[in-house]
Image: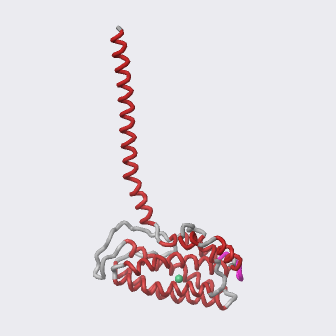
Amino acid sequence: MRFAKRRSALSGTLASAHTVGTGLVIAALTFTMAALLLPVKLFESAALAGPNGVVINDDGEGVWNTQYGPLTPIDRDFVRKVRGAGLWEGPAGRQAVERATTDAVRIAGEHLIEGHTELDEMSIEVGRELGIDLPNQPNEQQQQALSTLEQAQIGIDFERKFANILRKAHGQVFGLIGQVRAQTTNSLVRDLATRANAVVLDHITVLEATGLVDYERLFDDFPSNPARAAAPLASRSTRRQGSTTA
Ligand SMILES: [Fe+2]
């Protein structure tokens, strides 16, 4: 009887040990799966994050072989972005020319129209040659920017919004152009990036020449920007005193 009880207690202990063991195996497997999946998640996120907060859209079609060299998803996204820029910066430039109350804003508008007329032609030609489908309408964000400008009051309200919205967009795409220009192995994309680099720098220059750019707020949407993170607080507040609020 006593033996039977002891045996029963022993089998209970073994059963609970077995349960604990099973639990540990499940926990270990779960941990292993999580460890395997985590780098994939991080890699996927990193692949979509471009320089200065710009989003790189992967069309999922891999690398194409073309007579001008391999064409990567980033190359194709860049060509689409150049064309997309013209779809809203051209109209934004025309608004500036029509509504400007200062020469600097009018000149900035003229440069936008001129630069994107040229880049439109180049990107359409490159897209046709390489078989890349291009946008033909501003995307939602670009339409919102144009609406913001249309609704702004003529004068300092419009001009501050024009200078800051456009300057911010150019700052974001400037890093992507540099990356594509440095890394692409496709000769047509390289030529487009060379020209786009010059045009975008010109647009940054004329927008800043309006004297209306608030440099502090250019980084509001991408706080992880290393230049901002490295800036000492004292120098930030000093610069803030001299900056213009849009
Ligand atoms: Fe531009």
Q: Is residue 53 above or below residue 97?
A: above
Question: Where is residue 69 shown, x and y percent of the image?
Answer: 30, 80
Q: How many numbered discs sit on the rendered protein?
A: 0
Judge by depth and name the residue closer to the eye, 138 or 19.
Answer: 19
Q: Which residue is depicted at the point 50% across and 87% down?
A: 199
Q: Picture quarter containing residue 28?
A: top left
Q: Which residue is depicted at the point 38% across and 37% down?
A: 24
Q: Is residue 114 left or right of residue 65?
A: right
Let me know if residue 245 appears in the view: no
Q: Is residue 153 magenta?
A: yes
Q: Picture quarter containing residue 211?
A: bottom right
Q: Picture quarter containing residue 192?
A: bottom left
Q: Give the magenta-colored segment's residue range.
A: 150-157
Question: Where is residue 98 shown, x and y percent of the image?
Answer: 64, 87
Q: How is the image coloured?
A: secondary structure
Q: Is residue 123 magenta?
A: no
Question: Where is residue 209 shown, x and y percent of the image?
Answer: 62, 87
Judge by depth and name the residue closer to the eye, 46 or 229.
Answer: 229
Q: Quadrant of the C terminus?
A: bottom right
Judge by depth and name the residue closer to the eye, 237 or 214.
Answer: 237
Q: Which residue is depicted at the point 46% across and 67% down?
A: 49
**Residue furthest top as drawn:** 1
Q: Is residue 27 left or right of residue 236?
A: left
Q: Is residue 64 left or right of residue 182?
A: left
Q: Which residue is depicted at the point 33% across and 16% down?
A: 7
Q: Is residue 3 above or below residue 107?
A: above
Question: Where is residue 63 shown, x and y percent of the image?
Answer: 32, 71
Q: Quadrant of the N terminus?
A: top left
Judge by depth and name the residue closer to the eye, 188 or 3.
Answer: 3
Let me know if residue 59 appears in the view: yes
